[in-house]
Image: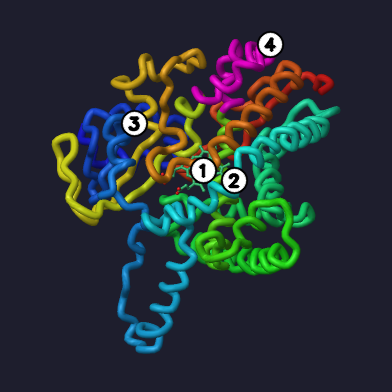
Amino acid sequence: MSCTTLFEQVLDPDNRANPYPLFAQLRRQPVCRQEDGTYVVSTHAEIARLISDPRISSEDLPDPQKFRWTGHPITDLFVRPIRAEIRRRHQPFIFRDPPDHDRLRGLVMRAFSPERVRRMRQETTDLTNELIEKFEGKARIDLVDDFSYPVPVTVICKLLGVPPEDEPQFQGWATQLATALEPNQRGDEETRAKNEQCFTEISEFLRDLIARKRKEPQDDILTDLANGDDDTERMNDFDLIATAVLLLVAGHETTVNLITNSVLTLLRFPEHWQRLAREPEIAPRLIEEMLRYEPPVQYRTRLAVADIPIAGVTIPKDAPVVLLLASGNRDPARFADPDRFDPDRSDNRHLGFGGGLHYCVGAPLARIEAEVALVSLAKRLGNPRLVEDPPPYRPGASLRGPRHLCLSFDGIAQA
Ligand code: HEM
């Protein structure tokens, strides 16, 4: 079968529960041109090569609604260019190339210090225990709504320095804005309109918060990014708002999916769940294997800025490129028995956090959150069972994860 329509099938919600057989077919041709001109890269070696190649850009893909002359000079010559400029200035660094990307990322890495991230372990432990206490007296829960969802948004709010009373509002914004990172949803008109509205609200909120952080500095990431002696140490309001939204969006649904995918997989193979409850020290290895086996970010899109010969084809300049990380993670040329979930796997250099210049900034934090969440659940949930398998999935093909995960269980143990 030709590979030219396979990616369309990956995007089809009917294949969301198990896209892995499609990836296996795609890997027969490591770089495959789709009918719409997109090049899908599905093997580990080729993804690893392109993810660090400067001829591959992260600047946002061209607007799907390409410039159309409306015949109205004010709209075409004034309003549109101003809108385009605003859009450009709000571009978060995940969608930028060097040198802008490197300058902004450098500031974030400094504020996201290892010490600050380590401090979140205790906060996360308290939070997960509080959420588990609420399961008392219930025989069933929805793991997504009752547990996985509130954990990362609360952690990010604490790191950024968002007041606790504003956290619920942040959660709503995070859910809506996640669609902006979702290539198969962000072209849809209704989603765009909702995102614009949501972005206006969150920007206004952040602008006020940033002003307060400048007046009364505190120990948090927004304060560090907003203050500094000169432009090399401080972000302007545009970049700071875009960065705060990026941290919220990139760090939220991804971590929700890691926790939920992990519980789903561990309950499909209950021997691993029982082992985690007995030997919590295996959690870090188990999470690495989860990032390989069911990565929360399945693919990222890029743009070729030059002709790139690779694996027997030439990706032409200006072609959209899909780096199918989740397929690289199941490549038998790189991982022995790749469809087997094996936390004891050695040399597990997966692509779950990407690679190259855009390697995930939040990887250490995500690892802590997932570890604390899974160990608390494994220790405290009595005999959990999946109520529905496969569970219903969210529409997104890139940030892929269950919308609900219903579990039944026999009570909870003390913390
Ligand atoms: C399990 C959870 C997570 C997964 C699987 C994940 C995955 C990824 C991946 C694959 C990329 C690369 C994107 C690209 O190449 O275009 C990335 C970038 C990024 N992630 Fe994460 N992420 C997670 C959690 C987090 C958290 C908790 C944060 C922060 C609070 C975060 C912040 C970021 C940022 C800021 C970038 C952009 C880096 C850059 O462009 O230089 N992520 N993440």
Gap between marks 3 and 2, in whole Å? Answer: 35 Å
**Magenta span covers which residues?**
262-289
Element carrying mark 4 = helix
Residue 29 figure quarter: top left
- Residue, disc 2: 112
Mark 2: which amino acid?
Phe
- Residue, disc 3: 23
Gap between marks 4 and 1, in whole Å? Answer: 31 Å
- When the figure is inspected, residue 131 is found, relative to residue 216, above or below; the finding is above
Q: Quick one: label 4 or label 2, which is nearer the N terminus?
A: 2
**Main secondary structure of the magenta stretch:** helix
Element carrying mark 3 = helix
Q: Quick one: label 4 or label 1, which is nearer the N terminus?
A: 4
Residue 211 figure quarter: bottom right
Mark 1: which amino acid?
Val
Element carrying mark 2 = loop
